[in-house]
């Protein structure tokens, strides 16, 4: 791949890195209770009213992620000693202090997924700047460590990367263009261009597919994730290093009928032994060490 040394390997000698991303959004989604003009439109049954009312059923479905799903998902990862990145909407952790403490004590990394799980693409520059600042300051308070990475809710603005650099972020995840990190040159004030490391995410291996495409069964999702892993492992061995992202949600994969799909995938990964499972920050740092930022 362009810019990657031909002899590059991940820190343990592997050619394939696996990033497990646990999205923590529950409690920070859109809600008229919090002053939003409409209720959260993303749910499992597709029953979203067009007028501004609370949707108690959907709220409880989200709450399930905190109250039951988190124990299954984090327990499965912790028992196997697998590092992960929790992309957290900051308000979700403010409202779930026990979960915040558990993440703080884990081997995982907590990255920013917004101050709330809401869209920022409509924000003017100063509003988005506050949104980013409020997010990392909140997570620093609840978890005890400042987050290094940022993931938006689907969309961001022309200002986002510049604002992330301004506020000291190490990497950005809002990209789906490849299977390896890369440097993005960002237009900054005064005509300067500064590098920001992109650590691409993936939508196709995300468990959200089981909500947006209900015909996709947990077994289908696990099989797709395993197929993705195997193909990337083959390319990594033959053509050069690769990175795979697996996106999870507490309220989705944390259900008793779905958690086994994650277990099947992790069983497959552990049977290989030639993959580096790491946080996104560790992946970002390893890449930056091998491929320095452009001057």
Image: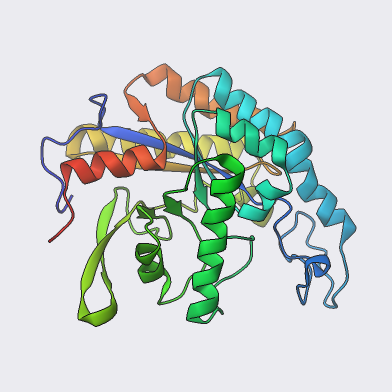
Residue 268 seen in this snapshot: yes
Q: Quadrant of residue 101?
A: top right
x and y percent of residue 181 in the render? Answer: 29, 50
In this view of the protein, which residue sits in the foreground, 277 or 228? Answer: 277
Residue drawn at (50%, 20%), measured in percent from left and top? 81
The answer to whether residue 242 is left or right of residue 293 is: right
x and y percent of residue 176 in the render? Answer: 40, 58
The answer to whether residue 66 is left or right of residue 89 is: right
Residue drawn at (64%, 61%), measured in percent from left and top? 116
x and y percent of residue 49 in the render? Answer: 84, 72
In this view of the protein, which residue sits in the foreground, 45 or 99? Answer: 99
Relative to 34, say whether 255 is above or below. Answer: above
x and y percent of residue 128 in the render? Answer: 52, 73
Please state the total of marks drawn on the protein image.
Answer: 0
Relative to 134, say whether 109 is above or below. Answer: above
The answer to whether residue 252 is left or right of residue 4 is: right
The quadrant of the rendering that contains the C terminus is bottom left
Residue 215 seen in this snapshot: no
Residue drawn at (65%, 52%), measured in percent from left and top? 25
Residue drawn at (56%, 58%), measured in percent from left and top? 135
Q: Quadrant of residue 117?
A: bottom right
């Amino acid at each position: 791949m362009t810019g990657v040394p031909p002899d590059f390997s991940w820190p343990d000698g592997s050619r394939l890195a696996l990033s497990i991303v646990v999205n923590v959004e529950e409690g920070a989604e859109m809600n008229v209770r919090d002053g939003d003009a409409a209720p959260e439109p993303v749910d499992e049954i597709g029953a979203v009213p067009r007028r501004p009312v609370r949707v108690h059923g959907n709220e409880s479905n989200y709450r399930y992620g905190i109250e039951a799903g988190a124990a299954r998902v984090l327990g499965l990862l912790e028992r196997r000693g697998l590092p992960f990145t929790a992309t957290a909407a900051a308000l979700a952790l403010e409202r779930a202090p026990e979960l915040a403490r558990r993440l703080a004590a884990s081997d995982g990394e907590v990255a920013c997924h917004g101050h709330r799980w809401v869209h920022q693409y409509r924000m003017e520059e100063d509003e988005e700047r506050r949104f980013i600042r409020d997010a990392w300051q909140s997570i620093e308070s609840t978890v005890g460590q400042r987050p290094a990475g940022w993931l938006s809710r689907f969309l961001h603005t022309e200002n986002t990367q510049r604002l992330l650099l301004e506020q000291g972020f190490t990497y950005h995840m809002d990209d789906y263009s490849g299977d390896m990190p890369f440097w993005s040159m960002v237009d900054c004030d005064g005509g300067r261009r500064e590098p920001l490391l992109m650590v691409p995410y993936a939508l196709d291996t995300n468990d959200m597919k089981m909500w947006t495409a209900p015909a996709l069964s947990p077994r289908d999702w696990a099989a797709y994730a395993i197929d993705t892993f195997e193909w990337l492992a083959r390319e990594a061995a033959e053509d050069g290093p690769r990175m795979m992202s697996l996106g999870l949600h507490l309220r989705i994969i944390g259900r008793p009928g779905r958690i086994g799909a994650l277990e099947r995938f992790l069983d497959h990964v552990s049977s290989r032994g030639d993959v580096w499972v790491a946080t996104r920050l560790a992946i970002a740092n390893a890449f930056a060490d091998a491929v320095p930022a452009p001057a």
